[in-house]
Amino acid sequence: MVEIVRVSRESFPTLVEGFLRSGYRLQLAVSALTAKRKFGCDQCGATIEVWSPDDYRGILELKAGPESIERKIKCPQCQKENIRYWSKVTSLQGPLYLEPGE
Ligand SMILES: [Zn+2]
C-alpha cells in the first residue's frame, strides 16, 4: 500500500528519520518546473515539441482548464495550427512515498 504524506519543511527530516528507523523505504519523486512536452500534430501527426510557458503550467492538454493558457502552435511540417492548453501543476512538490521495507 502506498500512502501520500504531506508535511511541512520543518517536520520533514524528523518524520522521514522516524519512518526509516521503523523499517520503511523512502521514494522521492520530484517534478521539473518548466517542462518540454511532445504531441502529435492534429493534421499530419508530426511530432511537435513545446516548452511550458512558465514554472506553474507544466501539463499540456487538449481542453481548456480553469486557469490554463491557450497556445496556438504551428506545425513545422504542414503549417496547420494546433491549439493546446497549458494547465497548472497541482503541486510543485513531488509526491513522497513511504513504503514498508521488505
Ligand atoms: Zn502537421
Image (cartoon, rainbow, N blue to C red):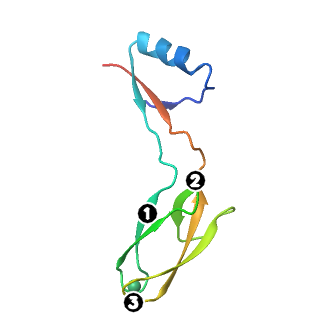
Which one is in front in this view, the residue at disc 2 or the one at disc 1? 2
Q: Is mark 3 within 8 Å of ligand 1?
A: yes
Q: Residue at x 38, y 13 (%)?
A: 23
State the residue position of label 2: 55
Q: Secondary structure at mark 1?
A: strand
Q: Earlier in the sequence, mark 3 or mark 2?
A: 2
Mark drawn on residue 28? none
**Residue 58 horizontal side relative to residue 101, left or right:** right
Which one is in front in this view, the residue at disc 3 or the one at disc 2? 2
The quarter of the image that holds ligand 1 is bottom left
Q: CA distance from mark 1 to mark 3?
A: 19 Å
Q: Is residue 64 visible?
A: no
Number of other residues with Cα within 10 Å of mark 3, as a class: few under 14, some 14 to 19, many 20 or more: few
Residue 81 position, x and y percent, is 50, 85
Residue nearer the viewer, 97 or 17: 17
Number of other residues with Cα within 10 Å of mark 1, as a class: few under 14, some 14 to 19, many 20 or more: few
**On screen, 67 above or below 101?**
below
Look at label 2 and name its amino acid: Asp
User: Quadrant of the image for the N terminus?
Assistant: top left
Q: Residue at x 46, y 88 (%)?
A: 80
Q: Is residue 30 visible?
A: yes
Q: Residue at x 53, y 59 (%)?
A: 59
State the residue position of label 3: 78
Q: Earlier in the sequence, mark 2 or mark 1?
A: 1
**On screen, 28 above or below 11?**
below
**Residue 92 horizontal side relative to residue 38, left or right:** right
State the residue position of label 1: 37
Residue 16 position, x and y percent, is 49, 19
Q: CA distance from mark 3 to mark 2?
A: 30 Å
